Amino acid sequence: MKTFGLSGGMTYPSITLYYTAINDIACARLGGSHSAPLLLYSFDFDVLSRLIPANNWQAAAVLLIDAAKKLESIGAEGLIICTNVMHKVSNDVAAAINVPVLHAMDAIGSKLKVTGIRQVALLATKVLIESDIYLELLEERFELYVLVPKPEDTEWVNYIIFEELGKGIVSQEPRRKSLKILDGLGRKGAEACVLACTDLAPLLANEKDDNEMVIQGVRVFDSTVVHAKFIAEWALAKKV
């Protein structure tokens, strides 16, 4: 199994989800007591979180490139950015290193195409919803029609992500409101919804099959688990 570098700690609960999901898949595939060979660079998320509202993506890119180079220098054969919003600088990171960066939306886009879904909704941070980080990839590369929540709902989701979920706080009232937002997106025609933030899945935890949940009649895909499975399959592929 190839060694993968995790650029994480954005936020700290999210890196736990990635680490667990990748190792669950590796153990299931390899059997016995096997686990995944992983290298981790963990950021102080407070530093990065201040750059997001300031749209200081150049500074963010510098930090992520530095982390990527360090991971590559100690043996990483591939890299993942363990947060959706920081994929904003994924092309900059990929251009600065000599190993592949496996993009989260390549994973989720491929998954949606395989399942035959045409109209998909996104729940994510305000920056991701209002930028081209994922929307253009899904629409142009995977020919999907993307629905987003109402602006006031996106503002609310953004607040819950940064002020509660990113700090490990999961409560019932935000869960109820999230279910209402999902119901509204389903009524607008969404066949599925992507939780395009690593911190959202614990809020909507439910009985699920592999990386999929069905909530309010809408198929819900956790980008973290879909991305982790994509990574594990790549890492398990035989070296050429």
Image (cartoon, rainbow, N blue to C red):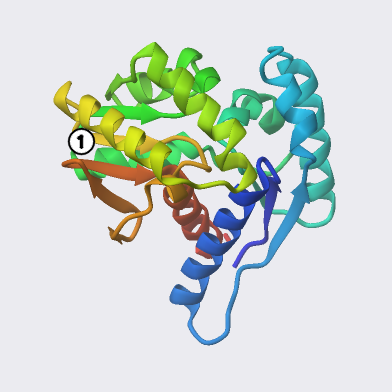
Q: In this view, does 145 lie to the left or right of 123?
A: left
92 left or right of 33? right
Q: Can residue 101 be seen in this view?
A: no
Q: Relative to 157, is 110 on the left or the right?
A: left
Q: Going 32% across and 55% down the picture, which residue do you hit?
A: 206
Residue carrying label 1: 117
The C terminus lies in quadrant? bottom right
46 up-or-down from 168: above or below: above
Residue placed most toward the observer, 123 or 96: 123
Furthest residue in direction front, as rendered: 173
In the rendering, at what x and y percent does residue 236 appear?
Answer: 52, 65
> How many numbered marks appear?
1
Residue 6: x percent and y percent?
Answer: 68, 50
At 59% from the left edge and 38% from the top edge, which residue is drawn?
A: 83
User: Front-most of 179 and 117?
Assistant: 179
On the image, which quarter does residue 218 sit in?
top left
Tell me the kind of residue under disc 1: Ile
